[in-house]
Amino acid sequence: MKRLPPLNFVRVFECSARHGNLHRAAEELGVTPGAVSQQIRSLEINLGLPLFERVHKKLRLTTAGQQLYATSAQVLRLLQQTVDHLPTPRQTVRITAAPTLCTRWLVPRLSGFYERHPNVGVLIDASAHYINLAEEPFDVAIRHGRDGAGSAQHVPLFPDAVVAVCAPSVAASIAPDLGNVKLLCFAPQDHWPCWFNKKDIGGYHKLDHVSFSHLMLALDAAIAGQGVALSALKLVEHDLKQRRLVRLLEDPVATGYSYYIVARSEERHVKAFADWLVEEASKEVELEIPS
């Protein structure tokens, strides 16, 4: 054991022997060719034996180098396999997302992520405030923005195609021309004018309006029978399944907005969470239209 050279020397040697070229080894290791040459020279001094010889400007293993390469390649491969199978420490993904998306879409699905990644925890900050991930302690942000306005770092989650929803008791009392509807509005982004226009329905300005600072509050008011709210279909999927809400008309209306993911890093646990979000968002909402 006393003569064992430093592991990093062996790693550099194995990479150089495998490529037969110091420059390609340097590219794989992310260092300079000079650094590779220096570590190989240090390994040869440590062992007291030459490991390479130059023949016509090409590297060739000496007999001692061939023996060391055969063993080192096998040992490093076994070591990597063992490390890959070691239990991973519990890591946490820190998420910031709008309150409505958190409570009505993200949180109900988290058990599926935990089953797949038991060593990854999730810390959620339910906030509508836009933040700079480079300056805040979060790994992933889920935000609402105009279609096509994101950068390469913005991964589309799902479009904000809205449906009109209300309590079943309210749906039964609504007039065919919607003349007696009370509109529950999400004040920061009121999509009701767009919805009326796309549905070719008049009378928007004649109807009663109640405004809320959070979409979650408008949906709670709709469940309580206080009027009709607009929401992305995916955000009310669970309420529709439980019949707390029903849809007034069939087709969602595109608003020109979408929900996006922004991840701060490519760390394995962060990427795993972002990939899972995209997978969940790709699942279709299959609900029958109530008669």
Image (cartoon, helix red, strand yellow):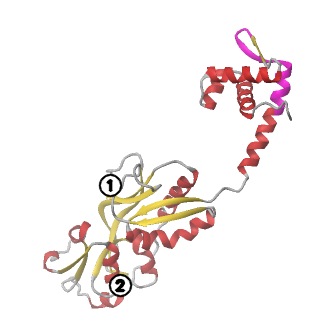
Which is more toward the observer, 267 or 276? 267
Position of 268 with respect to 182 (left or right) is right
- Picture quadrant of residue 52: top right
CB atoms of marks 2 and 1 within 8 Å? no
Element marked by disc 2: helix
Tell me which amino acid carries mark 2: Ile
Q: Residue furthest front?
A: 2
* Front position among marks 2 and 1: 2
Going 59% across and 66% down the picture, which residue do you hit?
114
Which is more toward the observer, 220 or 136? 136
The residue singled out by tag 1 in the image is: 147
Residue stretch in magenta: 55-71
Going 38% across and 71% down the picture, which residue do you hit?
100
* Residue 190 in sight: no
Mark 1 Cα shell of 10 Å, populated few (<14), some (14-19), many (≥20): some
> In this picture, is 238 found above or below 133?
below
Which of the image's four quarters has the C terminus?
bottom left
Question: x, y (%) of residue 167?
Answer: 34, 86
The residue singled out by tag 2 in the image is: 223
* Residue 98 in sight: yes
